[in-house]
Amino acid sequence: MAVSSDSISLPTFVMLSLLMIIACFITPSAGNFYKDVDINWGDGRGKIVEGGRGLTLSLDQYSGRVSSPRMSIYSLASQGSAHDEIDFEFLGNSSGEPYTVHTNVYAQGKGDKEQQFRLWFDPSAAFHTYSIVWNPQRIIVFHNHGGIGVPFPTSQPMRVQCSLWNADDWATQGGRVKTDWTKAPFVAYYRNFKINACVNGSTGGSCGSTSGDTFSNQEWQTQELDSKGRNRLRWVHQKHMIYNYCADIPRFPQGIPPECQRSRF
């Protein structure tokens, strides 16, 4: 499958496992940055290395994309004002403080489902694997509550979009800590990605088919957390969650969102 800024094969449901990738669009495959990634900005600051196995990106005040506070993000997103989107973002730290992971889910253009976690490890010290599972029932920890009227991204194909950018207007201490460009340039290193997906191509075929094709035989389309996974998620929520939109009562004067009234586990 080929990916370019003009013609892209798009996954409708996808399992993504990667060691942080930025400034790129990725097709559903396992592989090689040369084959599967388009670098669409950076003015030469993005470089594919290790024979296609890795990627580096150097950022400075002229590229205008990162410092501390910074945001490293990968997301799945469709196009248009009523877009669907799944965000997984690393917020920059300050003075050696822990990094924060910020997540959000948009369906039909509406998000407001933010959660934040203080990481118990340093994500910049070594490569780590980060995964998203998106199928018709759930986004791994964000369950499909379509049955109670909550929009869920099932009808629009999405592509993986990854970036690293300056977010000092809000990402660190509410924007009180600003970017220190004297420490630029900043270099991020990325290695290895694996994507398994149903591809909604130009032929208009549906990814929701239940016929005996490759898609219908893939286990990830019904994947969910087992008891061990649920216990690990509870631990993260109890020990490391610092913001949960479901607990932000003043934010929702008309009542908390309906999905918040159901158990997440």
Image (cartoon, rainbow, N blue to C red):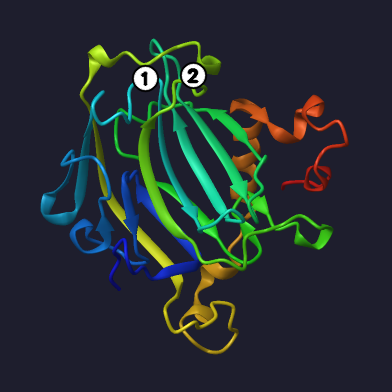
Bin the neighbour count of mark 1 within 10 Å (Cα to Cα): few under 14, some 14-19, many 20 and up: many
- At mark 2, the secondary structure is loop
Q: How far apart, in angstroms, are the residues tagged by discs 1 and 2? A: 8 Å
Residue 261 in picture, x, y percent from top left: 84, 44
Direction from residue 84 to residue 74 in the image, left or right: left
Amino acid, disc 1: Ser
* Residue farthest toward the right in the current orientation of the protein: 254
Residue for point 22% across, 60% down: 32
Residue 51 in picture, x, y percent from top left: 11, 55
Direction from residue 243 to residue 71 in the image, left or right: left
Query: Which residue is the site of mark 2?
Result: 172
Which quarter of the rendering shows the N terminus? bottom left
Residue 100 in picture, x, y percent from top left: 49, 27
As drawn, 253 above or below 162? above
Bin the neighbour count of mark 2 within 10 Å (Cα to Cα): few under 14, some 14-19, many 20 and up: many
Query: Which residue is the site of mark 1?
Result: 68
Residue for point 24% across, 15% down: 183
First in sequence: mark 1 or mark 2? 1
As drawn, 240 above or below 262? above
The image quarter in which residue 42 lies: top left
Tags 1 and 2 touching, CB below 8 Å: yes
